[in-house]
Image (cartoon, grey):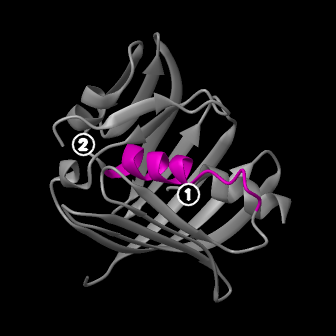
């Protein structure tokens, strides 16, 4: 259960100005960009493999985003663990009863946005001292010049998010689906 909780805390998982605040527990920016800032729609089935030290855990996700709302459903072996919906101002979540209260839907949303939202839109929302840049297809999130997270494309619909500050890797394998 602890591995599942760590995985959910790490998942992934821009309008004119999204909100970005510092997530108190992680020291990472808590992105909260408007769904419309994505500039396209997403409809994905995902397999998420989370590595934290020697531990590795896997969950599946359904991700849907349009200009109005972002929806994410995390599930494992047919059991829904977390549903969240973000409309640009309100983050709603439904959680499985066994999940602890400290599960961060905000972190799930921030990781998703770090991987998929446009770099320019993210930079508009980042707090002072933070910058996202892209070099040869790799995203690098800097805090005062220190790289704290990276997003590496690893295949046509695959990516690896490495959160160097929190010490985890998230391997994302996606299959586009019809919304």
Is 132 left or right of 173, judged from the image as shown? left
- The secondary structure type at the circle numbered 1 is strand
Q: CA distance from mark 1 to mark 2?
A: 23 Å
In the displayed structure, would residue 106 be above or below residue 1? above
**Looking at the image, which residue is at 84% across and 59% down?**
2
Residue pointed to by mark 2: 14
**Looking at the image, which residue is at 40% across and 43% down?**
114
Magenta-colored segment: predominant secondary structure = helix
Instruction: Indicate whether residue 105 is drawn in magenta.
Output: yes
**Looking at the image, which residue is at 50% across and 55% down?**
12
Dot label at residue 107: none
Residue pointed to by mark 1: 171
Q: Position of residue 82 (x, y in %)?
A: 59, 70
Q: Position of residue 26 (x, y in %)?
A: 64, 33
Instruction: Indicate whether residue 81 is drawn in magenta.
Output: no
> In the picture, which quadrant includes the N terminus?
bottom right
- The secondary structure type at the circle numbered 2 is loop
């Amino acid at each position: 259960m602890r591995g599942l909780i760590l995985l959910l805390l790490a998942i992934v998982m821009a309008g004119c100005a999204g909100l970005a605040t510092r997530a108190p527990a992680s020291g990472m920016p808590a992105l909260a960009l408007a769904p419309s800032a994505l500039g396209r729609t997403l409809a994905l089935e995902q397999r998420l493999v989370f590595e934290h030290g020697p531990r590795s855990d896997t969950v599946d996700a359904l991700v849907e985003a349009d200009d109005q709302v972002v929806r994410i459903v995390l599930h494992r072996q047919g059991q829904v663990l977390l549903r969240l919906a973000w409309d640009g101002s309100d983050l709603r979540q439904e959680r499985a009863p066994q999940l602890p209260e400290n599960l961060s839907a905000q972190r799930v949303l921030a990781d998703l946005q770090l991987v998929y939202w446009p770099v320019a839109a993210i930079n508009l929302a980042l707090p002072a001292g933070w910058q996202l840049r892209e070099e040869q297809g790799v995203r690098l999130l800097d805090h005062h010049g220190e790289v704290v997270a990276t997003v590496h494309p690893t295949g046509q619909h695959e990516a690896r998010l490495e959160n160097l500050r929190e010490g985890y890797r998230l391997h994302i394998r996606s299959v586009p689906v019809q919304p």
